[in-house]
Every structure is written in C-alpha cells, then in structure tokens.
Image: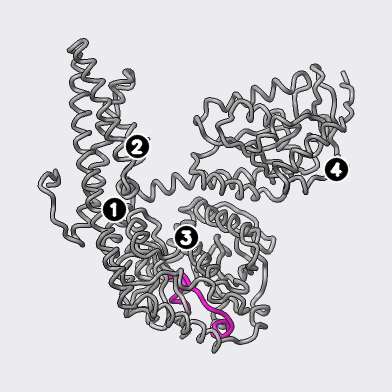
Amino acid sequence: MTLPLVLPAASFFDRNREILQLRYPALAEKLIRGFRDDFTVERAATGDPTLSCRGIYIHSRQDPAREGLRQAESVLSENAGAPVILLGFGLGYAAEALAEKHRERILIIVERRKELFTLALEYRNLEALLSPGKAIFVIGGTGGSVTGALALLEKANSPPPVILKNRALISLSPEDQSWYADAERHIRTWASKGRINAATLQRFGRRWTKNLGANLSGTVRFPGVRGLARILEDRGIPVFLAAAGPSLNGLGPFLREISRRCVTVTVDTSLRFFLHRDVIPHFTVSVDPQYWNTRHLHRANSAGAALIAESAVYPSVLREKNFRRIFFCRSLFPLGRFIEDRTDPKGALGAGGSVATTAWDFARLLGPAEIWIAALDLGFPGRQTHFKGALFEENAHAGSRRFLPVETLSLQSLESGYPFPVKAADGSMVLTDRRLSLYAAWFENRLSQEKNIPNYSLSPQGVSIPGLINADIEQLLTLPPRQEEINRILNDAYSRIDGDFFAPEEQKGRERRYAEALECLIRGLEDIRNQADEAGQWAARGCEKYAAGTGGKKAAGEIEKLLSKLDMVNRSISESPVKEAAGFLFPPAGDLEKQLQNRGDPLLYHLEFCALFYRSLAAAVHFTLKTLRANFPVKEPQNSTDN
C-alpha cells in the first residue's frame, strides 16, 4: 500500500527557525532549503510524517514516534550518565525521545545532509528538542567535524559516549557509509583516549612522580613560556615546526634557508636531524618523561637552542649546559601544578599525547604570522616509520642480526599499532594506526578552533587533517630572509625575561612561595595518607564483624557509625587542597572492583570496597611522600604511620 504524501506546515518551519536563531544562531545561518534529493515525506499509519528514500524507509511506516522512543530506551541501560551520540537525524524522532528521556545526559546529533535537517524543521514541530538548547548539533561538513563536539565532552570530563545509529540513513549510499564511518572512527578514537591514558598512567605513573620530585626545584630556577607569549605578533614572521615523521628526509637540504626565514621549533626526536646538518633550531620541545626519550638529546650539541620542557621530563634532560636556556610550560600533572601555580605560573601548552601537539601549541603561543609544519605525517608514508638517522633506526642497526634485520624490526614497529589505511593530504591512501589517529583528531580539533594563524603542511603523503593547508617547500622559500630580525627579537625577549625573573627581590619571593607550597603539599599528603590508612583499617574490621553475622541491633548501630565515619573521611579528603596530587597514582575504581568477591551482599561489598579503596589510596600517597622526602627532607610529625 502506498502511503499518502504529507505537505509541509509553514508554521513548523517558521517556529523551528525562530528557536534555532535564539538557541543555535550559527546553525540557523546554515539552513539549506529546496533541495530534496530522493527523499519523500509520507504519512505513517499514525498520521505522523515518515521518511523514505528510493523505497527505503528511514523511519517506521506504522509509528515512527514509538520507534524513536524504543531506540532511545535501547541506550537507557548502557553506561548510565554517559553522553549519547546519534548518527543520522532523519526527521528527529529518536533525537526528540533522547532529549525527553535522557535530560541529564549530553546529546550530540550528527547528520551528514544539511537539507535533510531542514526537511525535519519543515515537517515536524521540534520545539521540545530545540528549546532547551542542550543538544549539540553537528550538521554537514566532514565526518571529522564531530571532533569539535567531542572537545566539549572533554571539557565536561565525560565518560565514553554511547553511539545510537539510524542504520537505514547512514547506509543509504557509499558516500553516506564513508561519511558516517569516518565520524564513528573519530568518536571511537576519542573514546579510546581514556583507556590509553589509564594504561599509560599505570605503566609510567611512578616514573613521572620520581621525575617530578627531582625537578620541582626547576619551578624556582626556570622561567615559564608565558614570557614568550606573542613575541612575534604583528611582525609578519613565520614559525617552522619540524615533527619527526618519515617525510622529514626530503627537507634536509633546505634547513639552513628555512632557519633564515622562520623561527624554527623542533621536537626532541627531530633535533638530531638539524644538528647533523649543522643547523641549530631556535627552540626544542621535550615533554616525554621516559628515560629512553633522553637518548634523543644525548650528546646533542644544541647550546644555541632554548629548551621548552615540562617538569616531569627525565631529570638529565634539564642539564643547563646542553641548551642556551630552559623554559618550563605548566605541568601536565597535579603534583607539579600544585607547586607551580603557587610559586610561579609557567603558562599552559596543549597536550594531545604527542610532543608534536605541545610543540604546535608553543609555536602558536609565539604569535607568528603563519606556521609551516614539516613531517607531521601521523602515518607511515611508503611504510616508513621514522626519518633516516632517527634514534630508532640507529638502535635498530645496532641490535640487528642475521635473523632479525633492520627491515624486520621496522615492520614489527609498524604492525604493532594495528595499522589501517586512511586518506592522505595529496588524495592517496596512507597507513596510520590507533595512536597516531588520536593525535590527528587532536590537531583537527585544535585547528578548527584556531582561525587567526594559517597552518601549512609540507607533508603531502601524511594523513589528511582538515585545517592544514597543503603547501610545498618552494612556497616557503619565497619568503624573505629575517634572520637578523629574529635574533634581535629573541635576544630582546630573553633580556626582558632575565630582568623580570632573576631580579633579586623576585627570586627571594619566589623561593619563599616555593618553600611554603612544598610544605603545604607534604603536610596535606601526610594528612590524607593518615586518614586513608585509618579508614582502611576501620572498613576491614567492619567487614570481619559483618561477615561473622553477630550482634543484632548493636552490630547494626556500629555499622551505621562506621559508615558515618567513612563518609566524614571521604568529605575531608575531597575538600583537601592536595586531593588531586594525592589521587594521581590511584588505580581506576574499576580495577579495584575486579578484586572484590562478595557481590551478593551490597553492604559487605561496599565495606570491602572501602577497605581496598582507602588502603590503595594510602599506598599511593605513601609513594609520593617517599619520593618528595628523598628530594626535600621534611621532619616527620610524631603521629605519622609512615614506616
């Protein structure tokens, strides 16, 4: 049976547009009317409009509103409180139900076709969805446009999102399939970041803490990057940023000419490439805390370059004789931030998990006319993993043998990240992996926000990143030489910073603030450690008594008092100014829950969890205190439980 066609109601569109202009003005400007493609709006059995495309129904022919409600309810039990991302808007039934049923959740609506979104505005009253102004719309653009919405989830510290798909809509054509697959890949890459960060913290957290303990005095010794902010602004001088991808190989002959025209910034992994060609960059950025990363700087005669570092780098990186000077950016970790923010704020730089992300944000901080980026491949062009002469290659040659040649080691490195093909900047295909695609998503998001500074890519075979403008080296070399002016600007900036930072009164005040912050940190950690240790013992004894099953009303009263005491400890710790530093090494709650046994009894389960929780917290804080005391001895109070 053919369903009758439905005519649009002018009042719907006018009212919906009014709400859009009020709540989503940028989206209202992008409305497209008149183009319908192969879509047909028909009347469902209930009288509501439904949508079809070349005989394929996007919504139910019987009751599209009920279908949308069922779809919304299907994610009700998934990850309570998690954001919901809807792929495929159609006429908005599922989106409307989600907005009604999950008002406490963040809702992101992703629709490839702008004209289809307009169609929904014409045929349905979407006031209930639009009026609150809480939903986030990603309409049109590329599939990667969803990264802007994901950035909002990051600011809200949200858990990984739940994805709900309109399967008919997202598979209408090969173009639709590709677009939504790209959007879903960006979503899953972003969601995997939390798991990657947790695994990285578990593996390297103690090393970071040791590094921070050894480097905290750098807060007093080294000025912050904030002193370099906008030193190139309105001067028309570009920055050249050298990442460490394989395409760096082709730029060796041009480095000297580039350094005459640009302020040059390298990452630590690409510094050797410059030095081997007798070119010293103006800045080198290093933020990786691992020992092996220091090998990139080992015996690197870079005394003419300034080092931009984070306070958790391996301590040997901060040997001042290796660099012209050292600047700190704001620590990525709560232990370092606690001291820096109270002693001498350094200036924050972005962190996307790769030193290249921090280096780009530093280049942006300088206020250049434009940024030229080399070797940001974020993939494996020609199946190469590194530029020739990289530390990896040197180590591979040193460790190769007859049955394990360099080629095998390189292939193992490539395949370890589960590579997959994506579009390259020049339109070809290039292999990338999950880790590199996460960095690409970070750059795409940040470039979408940075509209004032053009960013040019010199890596045509690298991963395509929206916002990066493809260019070639000839374009860069047409820029006029600015070497003398660059040197004058940097020397003036360094003189100003030295005059401010190393002034005797300022040094004295900074040392005083540093000592006060350090004492506050250690005393606060001691307090949390002692409270957590005591609370863990209380909870353990409560478990034993409750499991024994004795006591009647008296036992019930004791359990109630115990729960009240644990709640007081929890409030006290949550109000501590050092709580973030205390919880840095704390394992994820999910890892603790895996160790518990008594899941059948909610109260016993809760007491067991509390005992494990507080003991784990006490152990984590104990390690941090031990590390701090190794570098900054502080007299222990008499009531300490630290042995």
Q: Quadrant of residue 599?
A: top left
> For this view, does 303 lie left or right of residue 458?
left
Alpha-carbon neighbours of circle 1 within 10 Å: few (<14), some, or many (≥20)? Answer: some
Element on which disc 4 rests? loop
Which colour style is shown? Answer: one colour
Element on which disc 2 rests? helix
Residue shown at 13% from the left, 49% from the top? 637
Q: CA distance from mark 1 to mark 2?
A: 17 Å
Q: CA distance from mark 3 to mark 2?
A: 26 Å
Q: Nearer the viewer, mark 1 or mark 4?
A: 4
Instruction: Tell which circle, 1 or 2, labels the residue nearer the N-terminal end.
Output: 1
Q: How many marks?
A: 4
Residue placed under numbered mark 1 in the picture: 206
Q: Is residue 260 magenta?
A: yes
Instruction: Tell which circle, 1 or 3, labels the residue nearer the N-terminal end.
Output: 1
Q: Mark 1 belongs to which amino acid? A: Arg
Q: Nearer the viewer, mark 3 or mark 4?
A: 4
Q: Nearer the viewer, mark 4 or mark 2?
A: 4
- Direction front: furthest residue: 505
Q: Do the CB atoms of the residues marked 1 and 3 lie less than 8 Å apart? A: no
Relative height, residue 78 to residue 234 (above, below)? above
Residue placed under numbered mark 4 in the picture: 33
Instruction: Tell which circle, 4 or 2, labels the residue nearer the N-terminal end.
Output: 4
Residue placed under numbered mark 3 in the picture: 354
Q: Do the CB atoms of the residues marked 3 and 4 lie less than 8 Å apart? A: no
> For this view, does 112 lie left or right of residue 395?
right
Which residues are drawn in magenta?
Answer: 256-274
Q: Mark 2 belongs to which amino acid? A: Asp
Residue placed under numbered mark 2 in the picture: 591
Instruction: Tell which circle, 1 or 4, labels the residue nearer the N-terminal end.
Output: 4
Q: Mark 3 belongs to which amino acid? A: Ser
